[in-house]
Amino acid sequence: MFDITAIPALQDNYIWAIHDDRHAVVVDPGDATPVLAFLDAQGLLLDAILCTHRHHDHTGGIAELREVYNVPVYGRRHPNNLHITDELREGDKLKLEGLGAQFDIIEIPGHVDDHIAFIGPGIVFCGDVLFGAGCGRNFEGTPAQLHHSLQRLAQLPDTTRVYCAHEYTAANLRFALACEPDNPAVKQRIATTQQLRAANQITLPSTIALEKATNPFLRCTQPEIIRTLQQRGLTDTSERGVSELGIFTAMREWKNHF
Ligand SMILES: [Zn+2]
C-alpha cells in the first residue's frame, strides 16, 4: 500500500507524492527543489515522474529531478513537452511495480490538448481539469471538450478522492455561491474550507461526491444555475442557450471575469 502526500510548490501548486517508506513517484513536479527536500527528509528514492499536461508549473522541475534520478517520465507527448520518455494515451494502463499501484489513463482535453488523468484505485490525479469547486481554463480545444472531460471524471465512483494540482478551492467556492446562492452544500463547504485554510491546511483531496454537490461546472442542469445565468443576461432563453453545454460555456466565460 502507499500514501499520498502533498508537496506545496510555486504559488499555489501541489506536487503529489505517491510513496511507501522507501519509494516515491511524483505527479507534476513544477519545481524540483521542494521535491528533493521531501525525498531527502523522508529518506525516499524517486522511481518515476507522472505528468498530466505540459504547462510549465507542472513540468518545470522535471529536468533538474532527472539530473539526480534518471527515472521515466510518463505522460502524453507534445511538441512543447520534450520531457516525456514513456507516452501514455487513452486506454493505456500504467503499473508502478515498486509501489504496487496501477493507473488507467484517460485523455481529458479542454484545458490543453495533451491533458491526461491517472485513475487509480479510489483516486484520480486530474491536473488542471477538475479543481475543488471549479475547473481549469479553456486554453485549447472547445468548451464542449472541457465539458466532456469533466463529465468523464464525474462518472468515477462517488468515493473517488480527487487530487487536483492547485489550491483554488476558496476562490472557486465564491464563484460557486454566486452561481447557486441557495445550495446548502456550497455553504457548508465554504465553512469547512475557511476552517482548513485558517489552520493552514490544504483543502484537497476532495471527492467526486463533494464535487458533484458543490462544483457548478458539474451542475449545469441545476435550475438555480440556469436562472442565475439568465438573470445576469449571460445566456439566452433559446434551446441552445439553456442546453447543458450552453450553460457550461456561459459559466466558464463568466468565471474568467469573476
Ligand atoms: Zn495547466
Image (tube, rainbow, N blue to C red):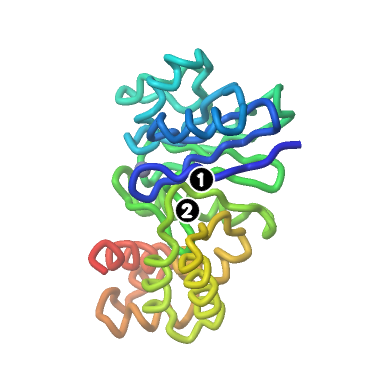
User: In the image shown, does 67 or 239 lie closer to the viewer?
Assistant: 67
Residue type at tag 2: Leu
Mark carried by residue 20:
none
Q: Residue at x 27, y 74 (%)?
A: 234
Find residue 177 and report its horizontal and vertical position in percent: 42, 78
195 with respect to 91 (left or right): left
State the residue position of label 2: 130
User: In the image shown, does 131 or 29 lie closer to the viewer?
Assistant: 29
199 with respect to 10 (left or right): right
State the residue position of label 1: 126
Whether ligand 1 has any atom under 8 Å from the Cβ at mark 2 is answered as no
Regarding ligand 1, which quadrant of the image does it lie in?
top left
Mark-to-mark CA distance, 2 and 1:
6 Å
Residue type at tag 1: Cys
Number of other residues with Cα within 10 Å of mark 1, as a class: few under 14, some 14 to 19, many 20 or more:
many
Identify the secondary structure beneath mark 2: strand
Does residue 180 lie above or below 104 as drawn? below
Q: Residue at x 46, y 56 (%)?
A: 131
Find residue 167 and report its horizontal and vertical position in percent: 43, 55
